[in-house]
Amino acid sequence: MDMHSLLNVSTSAPLSTVVKVCREGDYKAMIDDGDKWLTFRDGDVTKGINPQAIVLFSIVDDGVRKELGRDKVLIPQTNWLDVTEGGQLDLSEGKNVGLGRLLAAAGLNGAGNLLENVQKLRGKGPFMVKVGQRSDKVDPNVKYAEIRKVAPISS
């Protein structure tokens, strides 16, 4: 991409400084099927910081897309991963509940290869999700949308 050509434009007004975020509420959503539908953040168990699995959900609501001026509204669900002292995923009772709930909502929380089941989440849905907002740590006026709950849609 040629940055000179990209930025060599005249503006008639200042650029936006605030990102519009999805309103809090319940929405129909699909797990995204793009390349970044699932990302991981490394943790540091020695400092008590667990790794995270971040799943992107695409909100299926024309009104929300129109309100936010986007073709696709992606909202993350952050799942903190419990790991053992040896650095393996902790599969014991009461651990990795967020990931377990997501897999259960998709009908994939059974015995078998966990990686295969997680990979089957890509593009899965629809679900009913609860969208919440959180404030930025530095500037509480800056808001971020996040998925707080995922439930299957009953047929």
Image: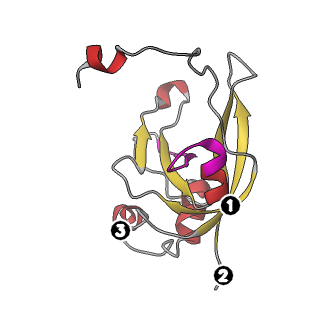
Point 27% across, 13% down: residue: 4
Disc 1 marks which amino acid? Tyr
Q: Which mark is residue 27?
A: 1
- The first of marks 3 and 2 along the sequence is 3
Point 56% across, 54% down: residue: 96
Q: Say what secondary structure mark 3 lies in.
A: loop
Establish if 26 lies above or below 41: below
Q: Which mark is residue 141?
A: none
- The first of marks 1 and 2 along the sequence is 1
Disc 3 marks which amino acid? Asn
- The first of marks 1 and 3 along the sequence is 1
Which residues lie in the magenta part?
Answer: 66-84
Quadrant of the rendering where the N terminus is positioned: top left
Q: Which residue is mark 3?
A: 113
Point 53% across, 71% down: residue: 106
- Single out the residue that lies furthest toward the left: 2
Q: Position of residue 136 (x, y in %)?
A: 68, 24
Is residue 68 on the magenta stretch? Answer: yes
Is residue 51 on the magenta stretch? Answer: no
Q: Nearer the viewer, residue 116 or 1?
A: 1
Near mark 2 (Cα within 10 A), the count class, few <14, some 14-19 or many ≥20, is: few
Q: Which residue is mark 2?
A: 154
